[in-house]
Image: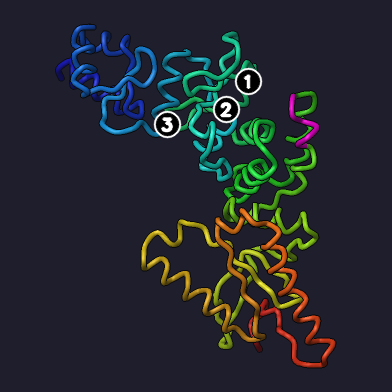
Amino acid sequence: MDEFGAVTSLAASQHGVVSRDQARSCGLSDRAVDRLVRSRRWAKVRPNVYRVEPGPPPLAARVKAVQLVLGPRAVAVGPTAARLWGMQGPMPGPGYEHVHVSAPGRGSGASAGVRRHGWDVPAGETTVRGGLRLTTPGRTVRDTVLLTDRYCAVSVVDSALNLGLVDRGDLAELAAANAGRIGAPRSRAWWTEADGRAESTFETRLRLVLTDRGLAPQELQYPVFTAAGELAGRADLAWPDRGVVAEADGAGPHTLPEALFADRERHNRMAAAPGRLVLLRFTWSDLRHPDQIAEMVRAALTAPQALREAGEPTPGSGGAPPP
């Protein structure tokens, strides 16, 4: 294998990035590296770290580049580690693309897309995943809760629970382990709001919006059955006593026409279930108007009560298959 092939092979094992020192060790000269950069075959990601593949570097490549610069003790933490574990919660926006990393002894602060933390992360709270050093799931959740707002924090805890990365029985211990850290007092109550049944950060945010307005759902992922006793679908949020269910329609299910059709078909099955369920659907844009969301849900919840008082048939819960 020639020098260029050796560098390419090494970069492939490092999410497409390689340092100048590593290129030298493979036999490439500084002049050759500079020529590759000038010709745009390589792109500079960090000082003396380059991406050998075209296109913007994904998160894993940017994390690896930072770790090549900061050394073997640099560990991805907080929202960055959460994303690497596949936890939902962190949202695109200011600071979303920052690489959060702990590098003891190198100070802290934000610069050039990197947010450095001076934490001394014990060896037992770090691991290697996909060739990247990052905090364990429990430590990742602890750090993220301190660094984000309530909506993001609860979403991350929900997601970690849903993915089986942490156990609900461990939440009290994780919260206690944050005692004395900056952000611990304001986030203490957030741990109790987590629910691992939520399958997306949108569901979590919708649940919190309604809970804050006295409309907390009675159930999550509520099963709705057809007249034949078959599962029509699972409603994201439900108030079985009132015959009301709600769906949090994220962008994902609607990316392809066939996915949109399947989603609508599922909603139609639930709406046609015995008991005349009231089906509400919300999208991400609705979150900009939380009070209107609450008004819609409150109106749906009070309608069945009016029917009861009038002595008319009321919507059933749909939660159990018909006999």
> Percent x, y for residue 216?
76, 61
Q: Residue at x 78, y 35 (%)?
A: 186
Q: Tell whether label 1 touches label 2 (CB within 8 Å).
A: yes
On screen, residue 150 versus residue 68, left or right, reads: right
In the picture as drawn, the residue positioned furthest to the right comes out as 309
Give the magenta range: 182-187
Where is mark 1, residue-wise?
121
Q: Cβ–Cβ below 8 Å for labels 3 and 2?
A: no
The numbered disc on residue 91 is none
In the rendered view, tell whether residue 249 sits above or below residue 94: below
Instruction: Identify whether 85 is placed above or below 2.
Output: below
Where's residue 33, x and y in %?
23, 13
Classify residue 76 as left or right of residue 239: left
Secondary structure beneath dot 1 equals loop
Q: Earlier in the sequence, mark 3 or mark 1?
A: 3
Task: Decide: few, some or many residues near mark 2? Use Cα within 10 Å; few <14, some 14-19, many ≥20.
Answer: many
Which residue corresponds to mark 2? 77
| Element type where label 2 sits in the image | loop
Per the image, label 3 sits on a secondary structure element best described as: helix
Residue at 31 percent of width and 11 percent of height: 20
